[in-house]
Image (spheres, grey):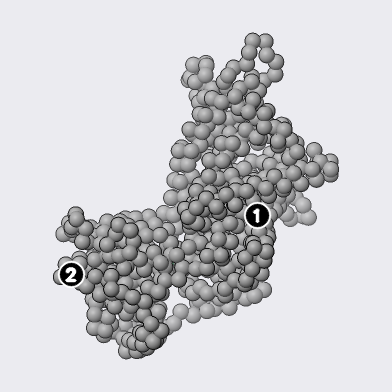
C-alpha cells in the first residue's frame, strides 16, 4: 500500500477483454478502446471511489496471455504485476479480467497470476454476450479453484462495478500476501501442467454456448474471402475518401465564411495599425486556414472509429498480411501503420505489440510515410487551388484522384522502404501473422462519440497551443523590419522572413519552391498543417486579398504545386514524430536515420515531379 494509504489495483487480462472500458468506467478516464487486440500499450493509472468514500488506485495495462512476456507491451504488464517497474511496488490486488465468452486462455493466465501470491479478483466481463450465447459458468467452482472471488460485469453498461470495487477493497485489506519477488519463469513441464489444469477447470466450470455466435462466422466467410474480401476492403477505403471530400464541403464553407466575417469584424473594430495586422492577417487568416479542415478530419476519424469498434479493422489487417508480408512487413504492423493515417505518434507507439526488434524498427521507420491527418489540410488546399475540379473517365473526380494518388504514394513508398530494409539491410523472413480475430460487435455509440469529441478537441487545441503562437511569430517575422525609405516591391520582401526565404531560395529552386513556400516549411516543422497557416499569414501580410486557395491559384504554377505535394508525401516535417521515435528506440540513431532518409526522398521526389511537370509543359 502506498504512503497515502490508497491501495493499488491492477487490471490484467488477455487482449481485447474490456480492461480499458472497465478502467474508464471505474476512474472516469478516457483511454482508447477498440475491438481488436493490442489497443493499450502503456501503463495508465486513475482513481476510483467507493460509495464509502474510500479510494483505490486503478492501473490499466496492456493485454497479455502470460507473464512470460515476448513483446514490449507484454513486458510492461509483467513488470507492473511483479513490482519491477522503477519506483513502483507490486499492486496490492490484481483484477484478472476475462472475456466471459472466451475463458480458455485467460484461465491459464489466472493460474499464473495466482502463483505470484498476490490477492486477486476474477472478473467475468462481457457477461451480457455470454448470457446471450447461453454460456453457463459455475462461479463457485471457478472461485474455489482459483482461490479468488469471482464477479461478473458489463463494462460498457457500467454494470457490476460497485460489487467489483467492494471485492477489490476487501482483497486489499487481507493481511499482507507473499511478495511476488520470488516469482520465476515456469519451466516447460510446469507450463504443460498449468495448461492441463486450465483445460480441466474449463471443462468442469464452463458449459459451452447453446446459442453460439454465428454472425461472426457468416460475415467472415464473405469479408475474409481472398478476392471478395479484398474488393470490399478497397470499396470501403474508396467510400471513406469520397466521404471525406464530399460530405465535409458544406461544413467547411460555413467555417470559412465564419472566419472571413470574423476578419471583417475585427478590422472594423480595431484601430488601424500593427495590432489589426496581427489579429487579421496573422491570427484569423492563419488559424482559420487550418480550422476549416476540422470537418474532413472528423469524417475520416468517424470511419476509422466505426471500423475499429465493430471488429472489422482486425480483418483488414488479416487481409493485408499477404501483401505486407511480401514487402517484409510483419502482419502485426498493419494496425500501427493504419493508426498512422491519423497520426504517426500513436502509430509508432502501438508497434510495441511487435515482439521482434527488427520487425518493430522496420515498422517504426515506415510509419511516418503513411498519410497522417495533419497532411490533409496541405493536400486539400493545394489540390483545391491548382487541380481543376473535373470528371475523368465519366465517373472519377480529378481532385479526388490526385488525393488518392498521394495516399497511394505514401503506402507504396512505405512498402518499398520496408522491402529495402528487410531485403538489403536485415535479411531474413518475418514471422507468421498471429492475431486473434475478435467477434463482431455493434459499435458503442458512446465510445465512438467520446473518441470523436476527443479528436476534435485535440485538433482545436493544437490550433490554440501550436498554431496560434507560431502565427504571432510568423506575422512578426514577415512584418519587421519595415522596408527602407523609397524601397520598391512588396514590403514583406524586406522583412526577416522574406530575407530568410530569399536566402534559402536557391537551395529550393531546383524543386520549384518560391521563397514564400520555403518560409512556410520552417514553422511547418512543428506540425505539418502549420505550413498552411503560415502560407495564409504570409500572403495576407503580403497584401493578397481573398481566400488562401484563390491566392495560390494566382501565385503558384502547377509544377510548383505538384512538387510541394510530392515534398509533403515524404518530408520529415514533424518534430513530435522524431521525438517519439527517440523515446521508443532509446536513442538518437533511429530518429536521425529517419530524418535523413525522408528528407532525401522528399527532395528527390519534389525534384523529379517539378522537372517532369515542366518538361511536360505544365508550368
Ligand atoms: N458487449 C460488451 N462489450 C464490451 C464489454 N467490455 C468491453 N467491450 C468491448 O470490447 C472491446 C474491447 O475493449 P477494450 O477495453 O479496448 O479491451 P482491452 O482489454 O483494453 O484490450 P487491449 O488494450 O488490447 O488489451 C471494445 O469494442 C468494447 O466496446 C462488455 O462488458 N460487453
Ligand atoms: Mg486496453
Q: Which residue is mark 1?
A: 410
| Pointer 2 residue | 176
469 w.r.t. 38: above or below: above
Provide residue 132's location: percent of width, then percent of height.
38, 77
Residue 533, given in percent of the width and then of the height, sits at: 57, 35
Q: Position of residue 469 (x, y in %)?
A: 48, 33
x 67%, y 64%: residue: 424
Residue 331 placed where, x, y %? 57, 69
Is ligand 1 less than 8 Å from the beta carbon at label 1? no
Q: As drawn, which residue projects farthest toward the top?
A: 485
User: Which of the 4 image quarters holds residue 102?
Assistant: bottom left
Q: Horizontally, is 487 left or right of 9 in the view?
A: right
Is disc 1 placed on a helix, strand or loop? helix
Residue 546 versus residue 432: which sits nearer the camera? 432
Please identify the quarter of the rendering in which residue 147 is found. bottom left
Whether residue 148 is visible, yes or no, is: yes
Q: Is residue 212 left or right of residue 414?
A: left
Residue at the location (51% across, 33% down)? Answer: 470
Q: Decide if residue 551 is on the left or right side of residue 123.
A: right
Amino acid at each position: 500500500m502506498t504512503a497515502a494509504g490508497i491501495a493499488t489495483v491492477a487490471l490484467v487480462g488477455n487482449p481485447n477483454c474490456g480492461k480499458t472500458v472497465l478502467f474508464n468506467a471505474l476512474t472516469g478516464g478516457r483511454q482508447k478502446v477498440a475491438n481488436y487486440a493490442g489497443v493499450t500499450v502503456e501503463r495508465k493509472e486513475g482513481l476510483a471511489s467507493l460509495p464509502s468514500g474510500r479510494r483505490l488506485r486503478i492501473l490499466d495495462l496492456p493485454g497479455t496471455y502470460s507473464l512470460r512476456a515476448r513483446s514490449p507491451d507484454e513486458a510492461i504488464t509483467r513488470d507492473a504485476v511483479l513490482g519491477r517497474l522503477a519506483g513502483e511496488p507490486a499492486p496490492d490486488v490484481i483484477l484478472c479480467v476475462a472475456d466471459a465468452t472466451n475463458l480458455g486462455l485467460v484461465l491459464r493466465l489466472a493460474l499464473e497470476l495466482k502463483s505470484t501470491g498476490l490477492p486477486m479478483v476474477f472478473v467475468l466481463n462481457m457477461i451480457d454476450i455470454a448470457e446471450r450465447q447461453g454460456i453457463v459458468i459455475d462461479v463457485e467452482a471457478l472461485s474455489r479453484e482459483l482461490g479468488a472471488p469471482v464477479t461478473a460485469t458489463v463494462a460498457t453498461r457500467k454494470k457490476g462495478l460497485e460489487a467489483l470495487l467492494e471485492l477489490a477493497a476487501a482483497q486489499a485489506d487481507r493481511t499482507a500476501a507473499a511478495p511476488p519477488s520470488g516469482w520465476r519463469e515456469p519451466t516447460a513441464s510446469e507450463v504443460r501442467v498449468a495448461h492441463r489444469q486450465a483445460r480441466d477447470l474449463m471443462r468442469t466450470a464452463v458449459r459451452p454456448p447453446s446459442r453460439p455466435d454465428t454472425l461472426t462466422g457468416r460475415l467472415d466467410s464473405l469479408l475474409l474471402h481472398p478476392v471478395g474480401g479484398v474488393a470490399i476492403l478497397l470499396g470501403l477505403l474508396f467510400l471513406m475518401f469520397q466521404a471525406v471530400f464530399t460530405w465535409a464541403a458544406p461544413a467547411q464553407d460555413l467555417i470559412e465564411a465564419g472566419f472571413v466575417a470574423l476578419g471583417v469584424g475585427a478590422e472594423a473594430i480595431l484601430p488601424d495599425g500593427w495590432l489589426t495586422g496581427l489579429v487579421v492577417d496573422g491570427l484569423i487568416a492563419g488559424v482559420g486556414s487550418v480550422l476549416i479542415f476540422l470537418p474532413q478530419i472528423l469524417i475520416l476519424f468517424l470511419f476509422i472509429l466505426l471500423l475499429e469498434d465493430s471488429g472489422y479493422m482486425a480483418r483488414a489487417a488479416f487481409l493485408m498480411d499477404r501483401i505486407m508480408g511480401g514487402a517484409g512487413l510483419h502482419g502485426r504492423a498493419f494496425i500501427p501503420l493504419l493508426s498512422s493515417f491519423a497520426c504517426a505518434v500513436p502509430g509508432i507507439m502501438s508497434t510495441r505489440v511487435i515482439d521482434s526488434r527488427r520487425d518493430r524498427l522496420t515498422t517504426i521507420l515506415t510509419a511516418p510515410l503513411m498519410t497522417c491527418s495533419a497532411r490533409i489540410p496541405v493536400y486539400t488546399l493545394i489540390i483545391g487551388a491548382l487541380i481543376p475540379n473535373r470528371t475523368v473517365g465519366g465517373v472519377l473526380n480529378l481532385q479526388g484522384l490526385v488525393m488518392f494518388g498521394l495516399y497511394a504514394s505514401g503506402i507504396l513508398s512505405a512498402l518499398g522502404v520496408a522491402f529495402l530494409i528487410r531485403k538489403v539491410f536485415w535479411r531474413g523472413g518475418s514471422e507468421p501473422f498471429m492475431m486473434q480475430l475478435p467477434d463482431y460487435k455493434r459499435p458503442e455509440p458512446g465510445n465512438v462519440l467520446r473518441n470523436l469529441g476527443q479528436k476534435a478537441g485535440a485538433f482545436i487545441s493544437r490550433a490554440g497551443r501550436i498554431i496560434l503562437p507560431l502565427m504571432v511569430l510568423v506575422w512578426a517575422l514577415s512584418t519587421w523590419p519595415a522596408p527602407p525609405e523609397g524601397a520598391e516591391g512588396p514590403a514583406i520582401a524586406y522583412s526577416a522572413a522574406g530575407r530568410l526565404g530569399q536566402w534559402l531560395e536557391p537551395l529550393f529552386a531546383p524543386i520549384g519552391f518560391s521563397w514564400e513556400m520555403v518560409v512556410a516549411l520552417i514553422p511547418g516543422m512543428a506540425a505539418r498543417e502549420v505550413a498552411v497557416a503560415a502560407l495564409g499569414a504570409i500572403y495576407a501580410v503580403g497584401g493578397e486579398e481573398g481566400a488562401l486557395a484563390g491566392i495560390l491559384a494566382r501565385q503558384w504554377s502547377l509544377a510548383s504545386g505538384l512538387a510541394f505535394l510530392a515534398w509533403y508525401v515524404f518530408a520529415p516535417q514533424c518534430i513530435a514524430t522524431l521525438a517519439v521515435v527517440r523515446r521508443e528506440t532509446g536513442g538518437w540513431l533511429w530518429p536521425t536515420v529517419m530524418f535523413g532518409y525522408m528528407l532525401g526522398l522528399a527532395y528527390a521526389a519534389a525534384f523529379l515531379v517539378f522537372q517532369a511537370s515542366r518538361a511536360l509543359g505544365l508550368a
